[in-house]
Image (cartoon, rainbow, N blue to C red):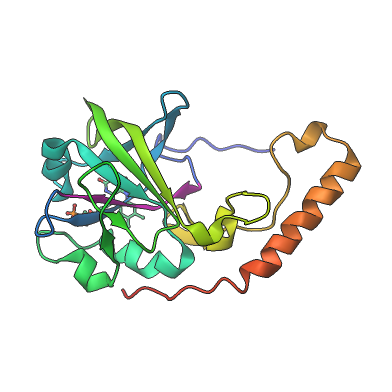
Amino acid sequence: MAKRSWKPGTMIYPLPAVLVSCGRTEEEYNLLTVAWTGTVCTNPPMCYVSIRPERHSYPIIRRTGEFVINLTTSAMARATDWCGVKSGRDFDKFRETGLTPRKAAVVDAPVVDESPIAIECRVRQVIPLGSHDMFLAEVVNVQVDESLIDPESGRFDLERARPLVYSHGEYFELGELIGHFGWSVRRRKTIARERNAAAGRRNSATKHTRKECKK
Ligand SMILES: Cc1cc2nc3c(=O)[nH]c(=O)nc-3n(C[C@H](O)[C@H](O)[C@H](O)COP(=O)(O)O)c2cc1C
């Protein structure tokens, strides 16, 4: 394969584009779109978001020490992009997008009701890196959309929510299922069974309709 050196840059894609919600009071509530996010530890469960200090959300998260990572879906794509180009200095982003702030279980920052998974976080460390500061945080609670839990197996099926994927400046939906964790060392019969089960879930996903958000 012929290779070419590219200037050093942020080339780890695809990524999720999440909506980070913050603020302690309704007047302060804000949303910003973040792609620089990820998991850093399983136990204790920890993740990060990297945020530029000039963002309106930055001093809010710094002061309150809390935020919520709300995973996004294709129905939320327009709102997700909009929250990533407009500032809470100028807009009430919940009102403008039609997204619904709901009380979180543990933190004071709101969760986005339309999000299939809301991850409530408490900041443990702020690491200045350059353009962005990294907020390393502990996950203190997770809220999931009940309608995505299979009543029989109890399995949580995020795929049915059509999660949003961000790659090199563009938004996508997930593509075809290729395999499950560990499938490369599993027997062919098991793989076929898993494929059929996934196809069944995909069929029922088409029935799982969701109102598209504004913006
Ligand atoms: C897809 C996407 C990903 C983004 N990722 C980040 C990020 O990781 N960190 C960041 O500081 N800003 C990121 N931004 C930009 C902020 O979301 C944007 O500046 C927003 O207007 C800030 O809102 P605020 O001023 O209300 O806090 C991203 C924007 C988009 C559209």
User: Which image quarter: residue 2?
Assistant: top right
The magenta segment is 14-23
**Left or right position of 165 against 56:** right
**Left or right position of 82 against 209:** left
Q: Position of residue 33 (x, y in %)?
A: 30, 54
Does residue 60 sit above or below 86 in this rendering?
Answer: above
The quadrant the C terminus occupies is bottom left
User: Closer to the camera, 68 or 150?
Assistant: 150
**Left or right position of 170 against 58:** right
| Magenta-drawn stretch, dominant element (helix, strand or loop) | strand
Residue plotted at (67% across, 50% down)? 153
The quadrant the N terminus occupies is top right
Asked if residue 66 can be seen in this view, the reply is yes
Does residue 79 sit above or below 119 in this rendering?
Answer: below
Q: Position of residue 101 (x, y in %)?
A: 26, 61
**Left or right position of 34 against 202:** left
Does residue 63 sit above or below 200 in this rendering?
Answer: above
